[in-house]
Image: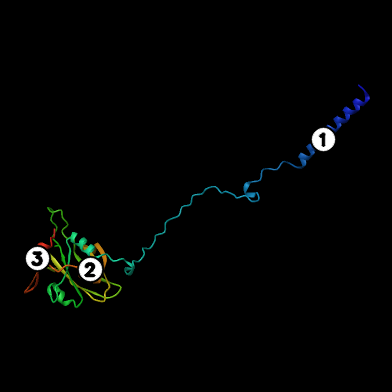
Amino acid sequence: MPIRTSIALALAAALSLGASTSAWAQRRSHPPRRPTPAAARPGSVAVAPPTVATTEATPQARPTLDLAEVIPVPVSAVDGMLRRMRVYLVIAPPGSTAFGIGALGQGRRIWAVLPSCRTTNPDDDREPCPVDRLTLEAVIRGNVNSGTPTFLGGVADARRVQSFVVEQSAPRVRLRVLGPGDRVRYEAVVEADRLADLQPPEGASSADGFTLDLTRYPAR
C-alpha cells in the first residue's frame, strides 16, 4: 500500500473516532429532556379531569302572594264554576233582611245558596258535605261583612243560605269555597263592582223574609 494512502486512512479513522467520542461526551453532559406538560407550555390551557359535584338542595321559602297583583277573574266565569259545585251567588233584593243580611250593614248585598251537609251514608257514595261555607275577603282595602249559613226550613240536612255585604270601598274581593275542616276547594279574586252582574234570586218575598225557588238551584 502506498505511504500516502495509509496516512489518509489513518487520519480518517482518527477523525471518526474523535467525532464519536465528542458526541458520547455531549450526551453524558446533556441528557435528553422529557416532554414539557401542556399546562407548563407558554400560551397553553390546562384541562382538568372531569369531576362530579353533589349539591344538596336548599329548601326555598314559598313566596308570599300579593293579592293586589292578582289578575281578577270575570264574575261570569266564577259564577259558572260555582254552579258546577252547586253553589249559587245571587243579588239580595233591596230592603230584604232575610237570611241575616239585614244585620250586615250597607254595601253590595250577596246571597250564596249552598248545598246541604248530610250525615255519612254507607249506601250513598256521594260526598255528604261538599261545601261547608264560603268566605269573601276584601282585597287592598275595605271590608266584607259575612253571616253564618242559615238552614232553610230549620232542618239540619237542608239547603243553606249565607249572606255577605261588600263595602263600596272594596275594589276587589277574594272568594273561597271551603269544605269540612276549612279545606279550600275553590278560590278566585273578582272585581267588586262586577258583582252587580250576578242574577237576582228566583223566588218571592214572604212574611218571614224570602222564599227561594229551590227547583232553580239544583243541589245534586
Point out the image quarter for the N terminus.
top right
Give how far apart the Cα atoms at labels 2 and 3 are.
Answer: 24 Å
Secondary structure at numbered mark 2:
strand
52 sits left or right of 200 in the view: right
- The residue that mark 2 highlights is 135
- Depth check: give the residue in front, 172 or 129: 172
Q: Residues within 10 Å of mark 3 (few under 14, many from 20)?
A: few
Q: Quick check: 141 above or below 89?
A: below
Q: Quick check: 168 above or below 186?
A: below
Q: Would residue 148 be seen by someone viewing this image from the given angle?
A: no
Indicate which disc, 1 or 3, sits on the residue closer to the N terminus.
Answer: 1
Indicate which disc, 2 or 1, sits on the residue closer to the N terminus.
Answer: 1
- The residue that mark 1 highlights is 19
Secondary structure at numbered mark 3:
loop
Name which quarter of the figure residue 103 lies in: bottom left
Give how far apart the Cα atoms at labels 1 and 3 are.
Answer: 125 Å
35 sits left or right of 103 in the view: right
Mark nearer the viewer, 1 or 3: 3
Instruction: Give the amino acid type for the residue marked by disc 1 in the picture.
Output: Ala
- Depth check: give the residue in front, 91 or 37: 91
Instruction: Give the amino acid type for the residue marked by disc 3 in the picture.
Output: Asp
* Residue in the image at 23% along x and 69% along y: 194
For the residues bearing labels 2 and 3, Cβ distance under 8 angstroms: no
In the picture as drawn, the residue positioned furthest to the top comes out as: 1
Q: Which mark is residue 213?
A: 3
* Residue in the image at 89% along x and 28% along y: 8
Give how far apart the Cα atoms at labels 2 and 1 are.
Answer: 108 Å
Instruction: Give the amino acid type for the residue marked by disc 2 in the picture.
Output: Thr
Mark nearer the viewer, 2 or 3: 3
Q: Residues within 10 Å of mark 1 (few under 14, many from 20)?
A: few
In the picture as drawn, the residue positioned furthest to the right comes out as: 3
